[in-house]
Image: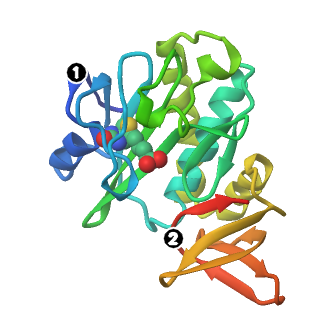
Amino acid sequence: MIIGSKIYYFDSIESTNAYAKTLIGKTPEGTVIIADEQTAGKGRSDREWYSPAGGLWMSVIVKPSSFNLLAIAAGVAICEALHIHGILPGLKWPNDIMLNRKKIGGILIDIVDDHAAIGIGLNLNIRAFPDWLVNKASSVFIETKKLLDLKTVQEIVFKELDGCYMMLKNRREPDLLTKWRHYTIILGQQVAVELGGVRIRGRVIDINNDGALVIMTSDQKIERVISGECEML
Ligand code: BTN
């Protein structure tokens, strides 16, 4: 197993992704940085990521042949890991982990040369969120009242992530995308996405081999969106 071949544990750290970026090139592929809490956790678009004790905050250093499907692989791995605990999350493109249509986790990919740090934030045993997040975030505990053993979840996430990452390494993208289609909550749904600074609305048709979202607009045009935010309508 590559993922977890070397592990750095911290009680507290500013950001596991920030630390991972300093290690790139000096540590083997699959190195994991994991912390009980982050004091300056980062989300996408440089947003603050609330990371108190009780969540899974980790980053993995990888050297993939393509960066396209890394977030998809991580999202699928998290869904598989939570399924093993009897929790049925879903994926919202590009990188949100959802439960009961609420965001319980996210993935942040930071690319440095030919490496990437895959940052995974999963709100597991978090009992409450500060005011600025109450309407945006939730946790496994809030949604299910289940308290999970963090160490066990960690180990299963390592194993599932290893499996999904190997699919990418071995050029088995179609298998990974089949799994994504199983977990996603946006296939067939009406969404709004930003495309070249323009907000477009349409129905999600599929995801491409390169990770782009395929949308059919109301005037029957097919649009492909490579990156951005997706809002469910
Ligand atoms: C998102 O915006 O949805 C992505 C959130 C990613 C958060 C994780 S927590 C572990 C890693 N370290 C960080 O600072 N961010 C990522």
Residue indicated by mark 2: 227
User: Does residue 105 sit above or below 146 in this rendering?
Assistant: below
Residue 161 numbered mark, or none:
none
Q: Identity of the amino acid at label 1?
A: Ser
Q: Secondary structure at mark 1?
A: strand
Towards the viewer: 23 or 227? 227
Mark 2 sits near ligand 1, with its Cβ under 8 Å away: no
Query: Can the viewer see residue 9 in this picture?
Result: yes
Task: Look at 57% across and 59% down and name the residue there.
Answer: 94
Image spot of residue 14 (x, y percent): 20, 33
* Quarter of the rendering containing residue 17: top left
Image spot of residue 56 (x, y percent): 44, 26
Residue 12 numbered mark, or none:
1
Disc with the residue nearer the chain's start (1 vs 2): 1
Task: Look at 49% across and 31% down and name the residue there.
Answer: 158
* Distance from Cα at disc 1 to Cα at disc 2: 31 Å
